[in-house]
Image (tube, grey):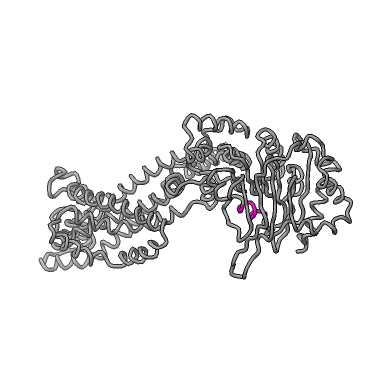
Amino acid sequence: MSILSEPATKLRPEHQVSPLTSVKLAHSSSPSEQPPSIDPAPKRLVVDAQDISLTFDTADGRVEALSHVSLQVAEGEFVSFIGPSGCGKTTMLRVIADLQQPSSGSLEVNGMSAANARLGRSYGYVFQAPALFPWRTIEKNLKLPLEIMGFSEAEQQQRVEHYLSLVNLTGFERKFPWQLSGGMQQRVSIARALSFDPAMLLMDEPFGALDEIVRDHLNEQLLQLWKSTEKTVLFVTHSIPEAVFLSSKIVVMSPRPGRIIDIIDCNFPRDRSLEIRETPEFLKIAQRVRTGLRAGHSYDE
Amino acid sequence: MTSSSLALRLQTRRSLLRHPLVERYAPVVTMVLALMVIWYIAAVAMNWNLVRDGFEREETPYTTTHVLAGTMSAERPLLPAPHQIVSTFVDGVFGYPPLAPRSLVYHSLVTLSATLIGFAFGAIFGTLLALMIVHSRVLERSLLPWIICSQMVPIVALAPIFIVVLGAIGLTGLLPKSLISAYLCFFPVTIGMVKGFTSPDPLQLELMQTWSATPRQVLFKLRWPSAVPYLFASLKVAITISLIGAIVAELPTGAEAGIGARLLAGSYYGQTIQLWAALVAAAVLSSGLIGIVSLIERGVNRRMGAH
């Protein structure tokens, strides 16, 4: 539970007015009060970001995509990033993935630099679009990262079978991507990201392009997956219910400059079902996320 | 009773019009027929004076019908009628043994060999150029202007220079023709393949990056397969252009064989029908070549999961 964020600390006095915050403060200040099932021992840090800033030079001047963001993620957590467009949540994920380099600050991923973590294949990345290779069958799509990483033929075959069954797509090996629905394609892309057994799963609005019903279904499946694989998941989303439903930790961000407003613990039991979305606890946390977004002036435009 | 059978007959007629075969081929047949009609009218109009002057020179009495018949069967008409061209073409193809010097098959084979060698050179060279351009900004800036310039010089002007220079160092016959053909046909391949190699989705490229793929792996597992549709589009353009290149290359050499040589001979001696027959041979050849490329394309597409 070692997430630090300076801007969030700064906002705390203002938050304390709301009774919800005091609940959260009680949680974060004294971990012993949390249900014993969660995080019994302090775990290894998978992401350790200190004071990360990232500015772009665009035609309209400098844009501060990230401003002094500090974040720590422990092994096995499910961390959601939520905020309006332009708040830097995707940028943060890309920085962790070494797809973009921060202008300043220090970042350790899986105990090494972000670049080495990428070279060491520490994470699987899932984009908003499935980005499957249309000329490869589903099986061959799953094999692609394995081929690149030099797994043996037998190992590849075995992993394809394992991970396809993990996303409930056994029997679709020989189909081409266009023969699958959008939701199925995204499941393939999740299986592909998991296929080489990375320490982390980075997901950038993976269900953003899907309809509500498919999305609910996939959310449940993703939770199952998280429970069974015990991967660390970093998950970018626009949707408050999705964030609250999935996460063990919610990072609320706000734009101009992109920064962290609040970090909320969200410790529902791991085998939660969609029904918890009607419970008062769920609504309380959702309310806090909304309060955080409002504090970041996310609703101003 | 009668009215219903009438309705039925109307319906069958209408459904005949909607028959898939009819729907598919009716436009083509209509176009060809229209073209034939225009062609025949043009042949009559263009050959009229020629034929009438012939009658007058020989001082034989003639009627309009005679002239009209004459325009359809003149020996050296300005514009041969379609049936004349077809019969000369068929005669050229089937009337002689395939390797006789008067056989169109023989001349087509000569041109075809230069075309295919030139096409192979051009396609490989064009693809290599595209690879270099895609992988290096410096090469893009330094090569691309020259590539474009190379295509701005008319090949008719350039071909004799090629032939003379290559002849001076002892290269004659097939090779200079192939080189000219390659010179023409590498260009669409380069342009198409640059487009093709840069066509992968940014997401797909980033995925490869997250897997720490080497540039070689990115090339063979992503860029190359993404470029396949562009490859076939440019190969279709390239193979017709390389045929044109081979024919043009035959003109200044005074080659004794090849479609170009036939064209040259035909224009020297005013053998317009022979000229047109050679043109038809070239058209048939290039359609055949495109057909073969399309066939290969379809096979490849099927293997790549096209729907």
Residue B35 spot, x, y in % from top left: 34, 57
Q: Nearer the viewer, residue A257 or B124?
A: A257
Check the image and report above or below for B7 versus B281: above
Residue B273 visible, this orientation: no
From this view, report whether residue A176 is shown above or below residue B241. above
**Residue A300 appears in the figure:** yes
Magenta includes B252?
Answer: no
Q: Is residue A94 magenta?
A: yes
x and y percent of residue A67 in the render? 68, 61
Looking at the figure, which quarter contains the N terminus of chain B? Answer: top right
| Left-right relation of A179 to A29 | left
Q: Name the residue furthest left.
A: B58
Q: What percent of the width, then of the height, locates residue B197?
A: 43, 53
User: Vertically, is B50 above or below B250?
Assistant: below
With A285 as the anchor, is B71 left or right in this view? left
Dominant secondary structure of the magenta stretch? helix
Q: Position of residue A19 (x, y in %)?
A: 89, 51
- Please tell me how many numbered marks the rendered image carries: 0
Q: Say which residue appears at 52% left-offset and 51% top-offset.
A: B201
Residue depicted at 33% across the width and 44% down the height: B292
- Residue in view at x 70 percent, y 50 percent: A81
Q: Nearer the viewer, residue B174 or B56?
A: B174
Q: Is residue B122 left or right of residue A187?
A: left
> Going 37% across and 46% down the picture, which residue do you hit?
B294
Segment colored magenta:
A89-95
